[in-house]
Image (cartoon, helix red, strand yellow):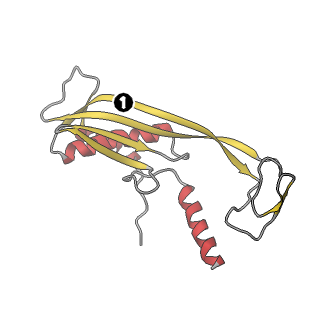
Amino acid sequence: MRMLVLACVAGLLAACATATPYQPAAADRYGFTEQRIESNRVRITFRGNTLTDRETVETYLLYRAAEVTLQEGKDYFIVANRDTEERTRLQSTGPYHPRFAFDYWYFSPRRGWSPWYDPFWNEPTSYREVTRYEAVAEIAMFNGAKPANDANAFDAREVQGNLQGRIARPPVAQ
């Protein structure tokens, strides 16, 4: 049983040790989502984990906008509204105390001996700042040639072609 738990924890840690790939958001909430607003208007969101930089999040958002536009049979899209939100927090980096193992007992002046680690009375903990980015855009999709004088208009095929080499997809399960 203990080996099974350790294998699961190792798998979760390995999954968290990479930047968010270009994928639909699943149970972990990282990846892209879209919401239809009108027949030719969609809100697209890309949420990255703490290892995904801002540029990657914004690139994946634009790539998804181009993909959705082409899937709808349209030629270009106009970004009506776009924003990237930055969320920064402090994360404990140690010392590590497993919360799932009751084999370890800690002494706390408040509670005495306990299987729960008390961060206020036990060894000092160090922290690091971690940042997570979430990009959101509302796009309107159209047929025909994109307007040449609109800086918010993007040719979907051109965007897809230019960004294709920067898209990291999740590994294929074997």
When the figure is inspected, residue 33 is found, relative to residue 7, above or below; the finding is: above
Q: Residue furthest left?
A: 144
Quarter of the figure with residue 128: top right
Quarter of the figure with residue 98: bottom right
Please tell me which residue lies in front, 173 or 24: 24
Name the residue rendered at 47%, 51% in the picture: 20
**Where does the C terminus fall, quadrant-wise?**
bottom left
**Which residue is under mark 1?**
82
Label 1 sits on a secondary structure element that is: strand
Left or right? Give the position of 138 relative to 109. Answer: left
How far across and how far down the image is residue 118, in percent?
77, 53
How far across and how far down the image is residue 81, in percent?
32, 28
When the figure is inspected, residue 29 is found, relative to residue 75, above or below; the finding is: below
Name the residue rendered at 41%, 37% in the picture: 135
Q: Amino acid at mark 1?
A: Arg
How far across and how far down the image is residue 130, in percent?
61, 41
